[in-house]
Amino acid sequence: MQLARGASIRSHHAPTRHLLERFTFKDRSSRIGRALWVYEKGRAPRASKNLDGECVKRGYFAGASSGETEQEIDERFNIEYEVPFNRILPAIDANLHIFDSKEIREIAARYVSHIFHRTLARRNGGEDLMGEMLSEYVSIATDPGKLRGYTAKISAIARRPVALAEVQAALLRSAEQLSTESAFRSQYVNDIDRATCSLALKLIDLKWSTIRSNVSESFVISDTPIVSIAKDRFGKVSYGEGINKPMAQWFLPISHHRVVRISHNAANGEFADENLVRELNAAQIVTMSSRIYGRNHSQWIDEKVQTYGGIYKFHRDVFKGAAFDLNERFFEF
């Protein structure tokens, strides 16, 4: 898995852009990169300049039925989704209000959707869902009452009588074929393009804007960089709300000082105070898979990672609206 990396076609290992590089703030005159601080549960914070070592998981895109190699898939993803976004990223970070253009929103929506679907948390959530589905297949196939009801539904859809034995065999065959680790991996790789396009169509016509930190505290980014937040009138925060929910807001940090916001409603302002910065950082912490990346060392970030890091799991597709509630009082802003 690679987190928002753009790559040269000629050299897969020579990135021309990387979302995390914006957190290192490379000195353009000297080309000396600034180290990222990396936070993990159960480990002390550490400074690292090795972005490939921190952000890349080999074998992540293996198993495509098309016969594409992992390198070919990753390079195609870079061309289709990441390179176009990286071209407009400086203008977004400079807050040039380019989201008024539908063409720009289409580029950004495809990128955001792709990064959301390629995260480890999303992949694991999909495997959980498939596991539950396969268990349900077996349950239906082995329970005469459930099998009769399910067969009746299939017959109604097919507009012809379908035999119980035919449905039972199909259910058991599907459960067997999709129950292996290689089948899970292949299903994910084969489906990521479809999932990307489907979600992007929902994102294009929403309200896009950027929010800048106007305090010394900076934004962090996790290996699950797209976070979903909804807050009710009592202050209760829900993570994982689907973007179809009217109160849902999705956020993507693009630098230590700016995040992209996607919502049904326009933002109240262009600046984030300390409370909002910490609220968004807290969302990155609870939805992380294993790592948080930041520009500076922060005792607050480390304490929250050790306590709350990764407690939210994508057991349901966030696009479909499953929610996880956590009152904001748990985070001492």
Image: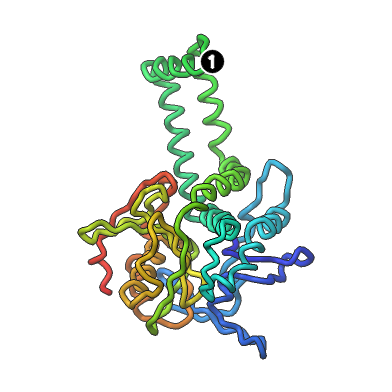
Q: Is residue 160 visible?
A: yes
283 or 127: nearer the viewer: 283
Based on the displayed image, in which of its 4 quarters is residue 327 positioned? bottom left
x and y percent of residue 245 in the render? 36, 48
Position of residue 118 relative to residue 143, above or below, is below
Quadrant location of the N terminus in the rendered image:
bottom right
Q: Is residue 333 left or right of residue 314?
A: left
42 or 237: nearer the viewer: 237
Helix, strand or loop under label 1: helix
271 or 315: nearer the viewer: 271
Q: Residue at (54%, 50%) from the top-left corner?
A: 200
Q: Is residue 44 visible?
A: no
Q: Residue at (39%, 70%) from the top-left corner?
A: 281
Farthest left residue? Answer: 234
x and y percent of residue 150 in the render? 43, 20
Q: Is residue 230 left or right of residue 156?
A: left
How has the structure been colored for display?
Answer: rainbow
x and y percent of residue 246 in the render? 35, 50
Residue that numbered label 1 is attached to: 166
Q: Is residue 321 left or right of residue 291?
A: left
Based on the displayed image, in which of its 4 quarters is residue 148 positioned? top left
Name which residue type carries label 1: Glu
Farthest top residue? Answer: 161
Quadrant location of the C terminus in the rendered image:
bottom left
Position of residue 1 relative to residue 323, above or below, is below
